[in-house]
Amino acid sequence: MLLTRKTSSSPAAGAPGLVASLSRGIARAVPTMDRRAFLRRSGLGVGAGLAASQLTLMRKAQAADAAKGAGGERKVEVKRTVCGHCSVGCAIDAVVENGVWVRQEPVFDSPINLGAHCAKGAAVREHGHGEFRLKTPMKLVNGKYERISWDQALEEIGAKMLELRKQSGPDSVFVVGSSKHNNEQAYLLRKWMTLWGSNNCDHQARICHSTTVAGVANTWGYGAMTNSYNDMQNAKAALYIGSNAAEAHPVSMLHLLHAKENGCKVIVTDPRFTRTAAKADEYVRIRSGSDIPFLFGVLYHVFKNGWEDKKYLEDRVYGMDKVRDEVMAKWTPDKVQEACGVDEATCAKVAEIMAKNRPSTIVWCMGQTQHTIGNAMVRASCILQLALGNIGVSGGGANIFRGHDNVQGATDVGPNPDSLPGYYGLAEGAFKHFAATWGVDFEWIKKQYAPGMMTKPGMTVSRWVDGVLEKNELIDQDSNLRGLFFWGHAPNSQTRGLDMKRAMDKLDLLVVVDPFPSATAAMAAMPGRPEDQNPNRAVYLLPAATQFETSGSCTASNRSIQWREQVIEPLWESRTDHMIMYQLAGKLGFANELVKNYKMVKGKGGMDEPETESILREINKCVWTIGYTGQSPERLKAHMRNMNVFDVKTLKAKGGVDKETGYKLDGDYFGLPWPCYGTPEMKHPGSPNLYDTSKHVMDGGGNFRANFGVEREGVSLLAGDGSHSKGADLTTGYPEFDHLLLKKLGWWDELSEDEKKKAEGKNWKTDPTGAIIRVAMKNHGCHPFGNAKARAVVWNFPDPIPQHREALYSTRPDLIAKYPTHDDKKAFWRLPTLYKSVQEKNKDIGKTFPLIMSSGRLVEYEGGGEETRSNPWLAELQQEMFVEINPKAANDRGIRNGEYVWLRTPPMEGVPGFKGIRVKAMVTERVDAETVWLPFHFSGRWGGTDLAQYYPTGAVPVVRGEAVNTATTYGYDSVTMMQETKTTVCQIERAA
């Protein structure tokens, strides 16, 4: 079977321009390509059965009784969208016939995915027909979900929220947002929470890369991926540590393998031999949680051999001398091997590869972030790259791969508990900045909050459970949490599932807003402990549209922003998330304030909703800090229509004029990767590689951010003389720009009189005109955030120089004694947080639970898995939850491959009758004899029991399995409250 049907007439005859273009492009790219060849080219591999089934469905969809065009003719449209799974940002052309999504093609012109898909990407069309979706609003009544109307749902939820507010204040409600919301929805939800009057909101980034954002931002300025997937083609060496990109970010491997073809040396460091490790030149197995000893063991040899970039360190880095002294004294080869299991020769070899093959890059993911010392681990990676001079260099960088399609964007502008959009923080000045943009009175906003709570960070998604269960006198807010929204978030992605079930039962209000009911629906409906039941609890399920049923922008891991066209109308009774926000705001009394600046358009059923382009334009007017201001809807749409003009390695447009608008694309970087500074009219091209001094700031160049003062203990924190971005008028270090600095430099008169009035008393982040940015960058080649040194020593963190500390649950009491964890904290993100007391109590836990338990991703599924396990074509590929166990460990327990086992962890000791989680054993040498590994995408089974009966009728996932996070233990990062999932302990026995 051919993928493209050949006809005697021209494929473009009578077709819209994009359809014709697509037809010509496919004919040119795959003129005689059969299905097997296409799968091979696209890297689908085991997805072949999926694609064949999908092609069969396409024929069925074409034959369906869909509404015809005005004259009964077939109306065929092609809508360009972006895959809704990981953060690579693969573009898709969706073919829609008479309103029905009948076919999809990867975009061969996309500089990011180059016409490739993984299994998940190849199956996204199913979401446009998902038979297992949540179809109508529902309410839990006597243990069963019953259909209700939208009017009833909104009325009852609104009334319950107002009741909770009156009784316990606005902080009694916690909202978990989504990393699958587009930028506009994520921003609108943070605005929605601000107008409600609480900072108790968070989203998935807290439990995937919050330690990265905090650690990296505090090292050199911005907490994001410095380079791009594409730029990795320029690397001569690459170190993957805690990243299994081959399964978690499959299409990103295209770029690495191109680099490998050109001689790039690939090193993979992981406790498990992954599919990424199978592509490596060097595989290094470390003990889970021992990243710092390994990285500093490598750094030891860099310093010992004088391989550090001395000039770079002198000009651009603060504190590396202190790091060097500590590494050379504390992390000698014997100490490194004791702590992480890697010998001296291996560390020396890794150091030599990274040092002698520069530029070299480093990649990390949740294997490094999800620890109680995750913030320190990521900073150790940063320090290694700084020592080698690899930051701000093409082919180098810290390439941090994010997990969801818009987790980067949701982090940047979404519902964070410690900041308003754009990392502005929670100071009153930040609220005044946004109040002015929104046209809402600041004093009115302040009165929405409980007294003293407006500037206090809220709780985190990782700890909402304790917000419900903790003693009230120990919580740093008036009330315990009583209401909870899961707005596009999987509960099984969070640790301590046993405690979560108890917390769900104690709530007064639980609302799920999602295209799928998620594990929340089943967990809320299944029986719990009688003493935890709240007889007044109300549980609602609201069907949200997918991102293919709306339009909006999403930010890939490399900071490129792409615009999704709406593919189809919202299915069933689903509504877009921003429509639901607007309608709920109406019930809560702040609808007018929420949408004051927006054009209202007709959405599902002719109902009003804010236009997503209008929301993005508001973002453009206020999020100056990270350069979300230059990416207007018009520029983004022009990029999506003209992907072919962007270079695959540099992402830079080579010429090109958008036929629809006349916009000249030449010089832009694809997706205008943030920071894209100034107004859209300034036409900043975006920043492909952060901190790159080899380019002019108006060509995407830059330097490290002056965000930590100008001096520390008599040492300048500003960049050295001669260290500056190309063409800058200031050729030494300088602080961030404000009205005073412009006046001192004599540049103030380059603003218009009107701009002067509005910029007076402002800095580059709060000047509403963007004029301070324009004058600094366009007129003088200077960076608005200043020019400073990166920090190898972060003095405001618990460990200014990264320290190895053992996990709270460790099998090594000898190392607990040498590398103890932090002291307990009385009030941390509004909650008491335990460290040393837990570790001390469990220091000999390895006698009972001798196996280290870790978790990670599969290529077939994503996140909590409810969406992908409800896709029949993906479900067919991975039908069982399993645990990987080494042959020695399996043989010692009488376990054979494919047999069911019970896995138990310490929290289960406190639950009478709970035998553990029941999973299949995969006996493999991927893991060593001390370690087991499980995927984290499963839910729908609980302690051996199938929960199918507790889902809404018709919305039961195809594949159900035990959630690994039913088994995970207590433990949180000392800066961000990241959960510790990668290093805990368990015991396994054969199931009878």
Image (cartoon, rainbow, N blue to C red):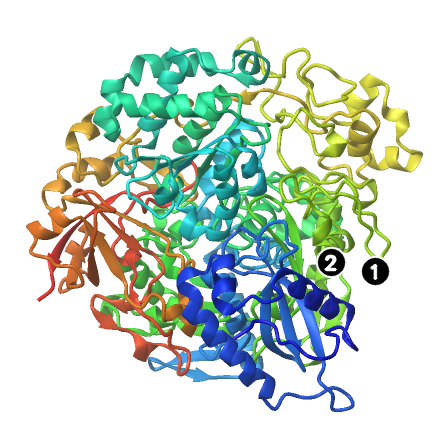
Q: Looking at this view, is 84 or 356 the one in front? A: 356
Who's the residue at 29% across and 69% down the image?
533
Tell me residue 711's x, y (percent): 59, 14
For the residues labelled 1 and 2, the Cα–Cα distance comes to 9 Å
Please report the residue visible at 70 percent of the width from the left and 56 percent of the height from the top. 640
Residue 775 vs residue 141, the one in the foreground:
775
- Amino acid at circle 2: Arg
Element assignment for label 1: loop
Q: Report the amino acid beneath label 1.
A: Glu
Residue 824 placement: quadrant: top left
Percent across and percent down for residue 146 are 43, 84
- Is 73 rendered above or below residue 750? below
**Residue 185 spot, x, y in % from top left:** 62, 59
Residue beneath disc 1: 660
Count of labels shown?
Answer: 2
Q: Are marks 1 and 2 in contact (CB under 8 Å)?
A: yes
Look at the image and tell me whether residue 537 can be seen. yes
Name the residue that disc number 2 marks.
641
Q: Nearer the viewer, residue 944 or 509?
A: 944
Q: Residue at x 47, y 28 (%)?
A: 382
